[in-house]
Image (cartoon, rainbow, N blue to C red):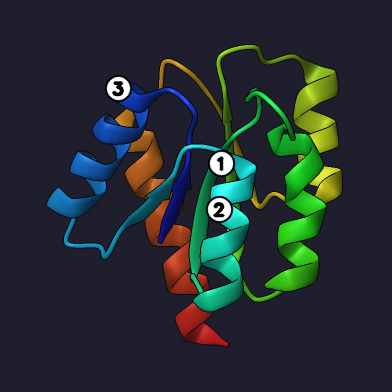
Amino acid sequence: MLVIEDDEEMRSLLSDFLQEERLEIDSAGDASEAFHKLVREAFDLIITDLRMPGLSGLDIIPKIKKLRPEASIVAITAFGSEDIHRRALERGAAVYLEKPLLFQELRRCIEKLIFSKTET
């Protein structure tokens, strides 16, 4: 799993939570770092913030889907709206969550995405 989050504290919180869930985690602080990792390694699941300096999460979602079409993407943001929600899903996100994240909700989403991959 890859976490793309520019806020170091939030990236650390997400990584710690996911490691406690016994998931293998890598992280990136921006889109450029994320793409360097995506070129070298496949990830089943990618969590990306939508609002970051440089390329935003909305910008990188279609690029991730083109590079790694098999990856499920969870889009997260503290600046949500119906329009952003719609655009994230249209661009290829499987799930859209608003901050502050409820970790139980994130856990359910991840389990659902992982379970749906094992069924195919």
- Is residue 100 placed above or below 89 in the rendered structure? above
The label nearer to you, 2 versus 1, is 2
The residue shown at (26%, 33%) is 12
Q: CA distance from mark 3 to mark 1?
A: 14 Å
**Furthest-bottom residue in this view:** 120
User: Along the horizontal axis of the image, is 112 left or right of 53?
Assistant: left
Q: Earlier in the sequence, mark 2 or mark 1?
A: 2
The label nearer to you, 3 versus 1, is 3
The residue shown at (39%, 40%) is 106
User: Along the horizontal axis of the image, is 46 left or right of 21?
Assistant: right
State which quarter of the image contains the C terminus. Answer: bottom right
The residue shown at (68%, 72%) is 68
Q: Which amino acid lies under the numbered mark 3 shown in the image of this protein?
A: Glu
Q: Which amino acid lies under the numbered mark 1 shown in the image of this protein?
A: Thr
**Considering depth in this image, is 103 or 51 the residue closer to the camera?**
51
Which SS class for mark 1? strand
Q: Which residue is mark 2?
A: 34
Q: Earlier in the sequence, mark 3 or mark 1?
A: 3
Q: Which residue is mark 3?
A: 9
Q: Which amino acid lies under the numbered mark 2 shown in the image of this protein?
A: Ala
Mark 1: give few (<14), some (14-19) or many (20+) Cα within 10 Å: many
The percent coordinates of residue 79 (x first, y second) are: 64, 11
User: Along the horizontal axis of the image, is 22 left or right of 67?
Assistant: left
**Residue 48: mark in rendering:** 1
